[in-house]
Image (spheres, coloured by chain):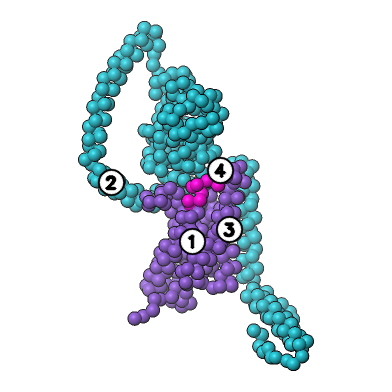
Amino acid sequence: MTPPRRIVSQNHYASPLALRLYPSVMLVLLVMLSLIHLPIPFVSVTNPAFAVMGVFYFTLWQPRYLPHAVVFACGLLYDAFQSTLFGTHALLLLGLRIGVARLRHNTGFIESIPQNWGYFMIIAVPYLVLEWAVASLQLHNATPNITLIQRDILTLALYPLCYFGLSAIIRKIQSI
Amino acid sequence: VCGFRLRRYRSDSTHRAYIILNLLMYRTMNIYRSIHDMKIRTTTSFATVLKPRPILQMVGMCGLFVAGMALMFMHQKDNASIERIRGSLQAILAPVVGALSAPADFMEEVGANVRNLTTAYAQNNALRSENTHLLEWQIIAKELQQENAELRGLLGVSASDTAQYITARIVSATHDPFGHTLIIEHNGDARIREGMPVIAAEGLVGRVLESTGETARVLLVTDRQSRVPVEQEATSARAILTGLNRAEDMMLAHTEHAEVFKVGDRIVTSKSMLFPIHFVVGEVTSADKESVHIRPYVDARKLRFVSIVVPNAGAQATTDTP
């Protein structure tokens, strides 16, 4: 029985262009996914922060395939549909990208799902708190509501699914 | 770590000195490693050769931070160009979001159909009973319509349309903890202005926040920033309806007489130039001296189309005819 193929293979000879473009395109799609109503039980209350999952995963996988400018642009796309000040999420996601890149510098890509999930929680919780604090300052309201808590829990809980999905696509591209 | 091997020396002071030396070397190696990772390489002549790529990356990153801060500052100062950029982005993204939401809509429709099939028998019975009830109301409505026309004839008052309705398709719905908004696509009517009511069959949905070309942004009544003047249908006790960023809960503020609000009371909009008729909003779910909570009739997450109410120029705020 052959072991499962590692997604951190350094030799992406098969489809280098597809692999290079994949994080940027997928991040744009994840941002769009945050903006549509998903008919999934529990998720229909509020969409999880897909963009946070995407930025964390791709930066940890291959930071050079996810340029800062793309993360910033995705943040602006998200901001266009939000009540917060234009540029807020662009800066927050850029900060997240830098933070995760720093983590990767120390750890490399973490293939073990529990570890990866653990690191996601360590990084995502301060990010979500900071996002809430910034939005509260801007909207002059500092009370965390139930929707916010639901969204944050969903974001943390659904990360492994996101990990599986994104990794499966990488394996598929590598196998082409 | 650094190639030094700790050995047990007879003298404790020698041993301690070796440990300190090892730690110092470890620290130096770490600094060297981080310098090496930044692609700054030292030559034998101690001249540093900096690679341009990380410097450009750093400059680009700082540029992005400055750009982000500048955008936020401009938006804070209500700069018109920011609104234009937002509007353009919404207009560009609207078809993409629409296309992406098509499969989700299809799935939702399939789910609803399956649910309907499973409850078809009970639904059929409920509809039969409702139909009988509505037929009774139809007879009463016809009588009232006739009576109304006769009374108008006696008083010499002619009924006039107070508003026109523009149908719009929902492109995107944000039910974020930080805001409840809709992006809608309309026919590009130039009369659509900020503040105009947006309604659905069940009642008031929200108000137009901004309109650019064929897209408009709607602030839902459930948004925390929304403020709508409302009144109790039966007693006309006035209040201001505020959202809580929850899809199924809103609150009344500045209530004239909090004690008159009872559970189950219908809440409608107060008449004004923007709200030419009483639009139903929701019903009271809990009421005490401290707070009155309202459940909206409209669940904006399930809507696909809405109507923008464009009040006629000569509409009187007191007329009741839609």
Q: Which class describes the residues within 10 Å of circle 4: few (<14), some (14-19), or many (20+)?
A: some
Picture disc at residue A54: 1
Q: Is B66 covered by the magenta stretch?
A: no
Q: Is residue B308 left or right of residue B139?
A: right
Q: Is A147 covered by the magenta stretch?
A: yes
Indicate the quadrant containing the C terminus of chain B: top left, top right, bottom left or bottom right.
Answer: top left
Local secondary structure at mark 3? helix
The magenta span reads: A144-151
Mark 1 falls within which chain? A
Question: Height in image: A120 above or below B89?
Answer: below
The residue that mark 4 highlights is B83
Q: Position of residue B19 (x, y in %)?
A: 72, 84
Q: Residue furthest bottom?
A: B10
Cα distance in 3D space between marks 4 and 3: 30 Å
Cα distance in 3D space between marks 1 and 3: 16 Å
Q: Which class describes the residues within 10 Å of circle 3: few (<14), some (14-19), or many (20+)?
A: few
Picture disc at residue B28: none
Local secondary structure at mark 2? helix
* Chain in purple in the render: A
Labels 2 and 1 share a subunit: no
Q: Nearer the viewer, mark 2 or mark 1?
A: 2
The residue that mark 3 highlights is A126
Of mark 4 and mark 2, the one earlier in the sequence is: 4
